[in-house]
Image (cartoon, helix red, strand yellow):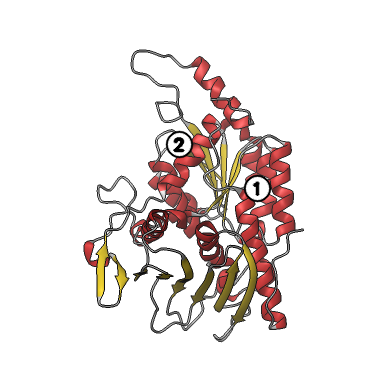
Amino acid sequence: MACSHAGAEKYIGAMVDAPTGPGQGTTAHDGLELHVALIGYGKGGEVFHAPLIDAVPGLRLSAVVTGSPDRQTAASRRYPGITVYASVEELWADAGRYEIAVVSTPNRTHVPLARAALRAGLAVVVDKPFALTTSEARDLTALAADLDQVLTVYQNRRWDADFLTLWRLIEEGTLGRVHRFESRFERWRPRAKANWRESGDVEIGAGLLYDLGPHLIDQAVNLFGPVASVYAEVDAHREGVHADDDVFLALEHARGTRSHLWMSALSAQNGPRFRVLGDRAAYTSQGMDGQEARLVAGEGPATPDWGVVPESEWGSLGIDGELRSVPSERGAYQEFYAGVRDAVGEGEPLPVDTHEVIHGLEVIEAARRSAATRTIVEPSHD
């Protein structure tokens, strides 16, 4: 398969020099490795990126960038042999050692760091939100195209077990024509944490619409296509909070399905994770995918039962009075990074295309306009 981007060319060079023999393949997961530099080692880097990179054959977590001495020590202990940089300037000076950079830093720094990494000759993974504006996102996508370099966005919730299960049911036609999709990320946190994400301003990317919104909107768009109109209720209820901590979005998709999305830090009783209504049946699931909790606990995809949902937590399918449990698909966050490996090393399609994510940012911007004007608005496609 042809590899046209810079990361693949570096990888092909390694393949040419590598010994071959009976049974040896030439793909990125057959003994050759792409070296990954992780920028940021807060919760995102430590919990959501490093363990998954480390678990995927063909990728090697080779460097971590963090200015925190405590995080430098933690990264070195968990991943012996990695290079730890105190600043991105040190990484850029050493960029020839790596093929991929992963940006897992505060939201307002995503675009400048991704831009610098691309210019340093690296393929780039950006944590969500991809950018704070669609204009920045388009410019960054254009830069990657000009440099013939891979650029993708970490939308791990496409590999949640319940989402994969719902995808299967829709593809099989089990629900019939879906006319309403309800999706929730809710928690009970009546006191805001004193960090930028919860107590900062919207201008730096704080608040739930930038934190959880990219997940919920991305799932809705993947299932039901582009959004034609948006109505939003965006509030900040907790003391000391400047950005939103309680959000409701009503989306009308171009194909007619309506998505209702809730995200809240002030939900004393949570609603169902999914409630999906079709003209043949409905599907309801409760609770959150378990992969995050297991990552927080220090587990990873090498665990034999990784992503397996216990039967007691399966969703229900059918109509009232005739419901049955539906076996859940297996959650697989690591598949995102397997896709990154294949895109960079073999020229395969991106695991997440930036144009899909840009539409999600269009929806977020429309939601802010809707909340400010208390009207239904159309996403901008400038």
Question: Callout 2: few (<14), some (14-19), or many (20+) C-alpha neighbours within 10 Å?
Answer: many
| Res 184 → quadrant | bottom left
Inter-mark Cα distance, 1 to 2: 20 Å
Pick the front one: 61 or 131:
131
Q: In percent of the image, x 69 and y 44: which residue is there?
A: 116
Q: Quadrant of the C terminus?
A: bottom right
x%, y% of residue 100? 56, 38
Pick the front one: 260 or 7:
260
Which label belongs to residue 60? 2
Left of 67 or right of it: where is 31? left
Three-letter code, disc 1 = Ala
The count of marks equals: 2
Going from N to C along the chain, the mark reached first, 1 or 2, is 2
| Res 237 → quadrant | bottom right
Tag 1's secondary structure? helix
Position of residue 48 relative to residue 227, above or below, is above
Three-letter code, disc 2 = Arg
Left of 207 or right of it: where is 293? left
Which label belongs to residue 114? 1
Position of residue 81 relative to residue 192, above or below, is above
Left of 143 or right of it: where is 90? left
Q: In percent of the image, x 39 and y 64: which residue is there?
A: 175
Position of residue 281 relative to residue 269, above or below, is above
Pick the front one: 245 or 4:
4
x%, y% of residue 31? 40, 26
x%, y% of residue 104? 55, 53
x%, y% of residue 379? 69, 66
